[in-house]
Image (cartoon, coloured by chain):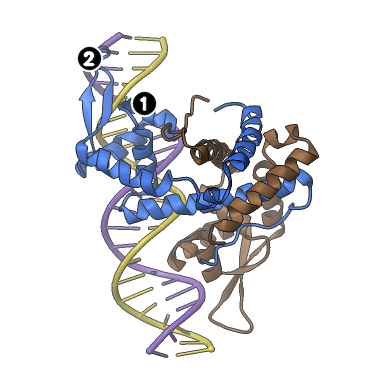
Chain colours: A blue, B brown, C purple, D yellow
Amino acid sequence: MSRTTIPEQAEAPAGEVWALLRTLFGQQRRRFLSAASELDLHPAQAGAMLQLASSLPMHRLATLLGCDNSNVTGLVDRLEARGFVSREPGVEDRRVKHVVLTDAGRQMRAELLVRVGAPADGLNGLTNAELGQLRDLLRRVVGADSGD
Amino acid sequence: MSRTTIPEQAEAPAGEVWALLRTLFGQQRRRFLSAASELDLHPAQAGAMLQLASSLPMHRLATLLGCDNSNVTGLVDRLEARGFVSREPGVEDRRVKHVVLTDAGRQMRAELLVRVGAPADGLNGLTNAELGQLRDLLRRVVGADSGD
DNA sequence: TATTGTTATACTCTATAACTATA
DNA sequence: TATAGTTATAGAGTATAACAATA
């Protein structure tokens, strides 16, 4: 692939780290898009499938995906038409519908996770001690950003 | 924000690092989407603007964005309609059209970079020595993945 | 013959607003 | 009154196929 990330600001001490992280972001994004494509899922559909670790109300799914409730209607319509999810009425609040994976949906999600969720290949080249170092540093980077 | 990333596989040594990286991915993705939205750009348009560090042939932009040539036609149409880019005919190969930023486009791109390209806030909490450590570790992670 | 960019088509995503049924 | 989900609508992205101009 001749994909390249945008150059610029790779000089500053933090900037250099940032450039490396962006490279990883790009790799991961392409991995996600490839996985979705291979499985014949639209990226948004793949994103929804990944969020469905457990059943979720429609509006909760909308929040997680960062889109309007109305979009989820069509999204779930299409996933339902392909047999990956079903809508189950809420018992406690009858306005709510829960999106729940079918067996086929669980299998599809597993396929996605194999392709997207696996640690980037490069991590396997590090020793456990180095992974520990990396973990500690990243924790501080992540922790400082408002946790969302 | 009540956005959460998908749990699962945070036990393995590499898996823990991977989970942290995914958190960063999510933060960065939301930052990108917010920036695009604030500037009234569709994510795909914002992505194109970021790639235009220098002029690019239409087909090259398509490759960089990972989409078909035919999509770039409409994408550039709309950016052109808003005055951010112009099409310039190629001199060496007359089939080619070069997409080049206008002054307004350069300014818009700068606005985007301020919002998206800045090092994640968390990096500022690390010492230079720690940044060096992090850089060395990430270089090995990135280097091992087939460089695209 | 192959490539560049365009057009046409069809499907999906996305935001907005209006509607319903619940709460 | 407010919330959950739907519908309707419009603008945009995306893939595919077919096409003209150029190589």
Specify whether disc 2 shares its chain with disc 1: yes
**Residue A82 x, y percent position in the rendering:** 21, 45
Q: Where's the C terminus of chain A, which quadrant?
A: top right
**Residue A119 x, y percent position in the rendering:** 48, 45
The answer to whether residue B120 is above or below residue A126 is above
The quadrant where residue B48 appears: bottom right
At x 63%, y 33%, the residue is: A136
The quadrant where residue A5 appears: bottom right
Q: Nearer the viewer, residue A73 or B104?
A: A73
Q: Chain of mark 1?
A: A
Residue A49 badge = none
Q: Which amino acid does the dot numbered 2 rest on? A: Val
Q: Mark 2 against mark 1, which lies toward the viewer?
A: 2
Q: Is residue B1 left or right of residue B139?
A: left
Q: Is residue B31 left or right of residue B135?
A: left
At x 37%, y 43%, the residue is: A113
Q: Chain of mark 2?
A: A
Q: Are marks 2 and 1 in contact (CB under 8 Å)?
A: no
Residue B130 visible (yes or no): yes
Q: Which amino acid does the dot numbered 1 rest on? A: His
**Residue B23 x, y percent position in the rendering:** 54, 35
Residue B49 visible (yes or no): no
The answer to whether residue A1 is above or below residue A129 is below
**Residue B16 x, y percent position in the rendering:** 52, 35
At x 60%, y 41%, the residue is: B35
Instruction: Report which residue position mark 1 lands on.
Output: A59
* SS under mark 2: loop
Q: Nearer the viewer, residue B131 or B32?
A: B131
Q: Exactly how many numbered labels are in the figure?
A: 2
Instruction: Report which residue position mark 2 lands on.
Output: A91
Q: Is residue A1 left or right of residue A44?
A: right
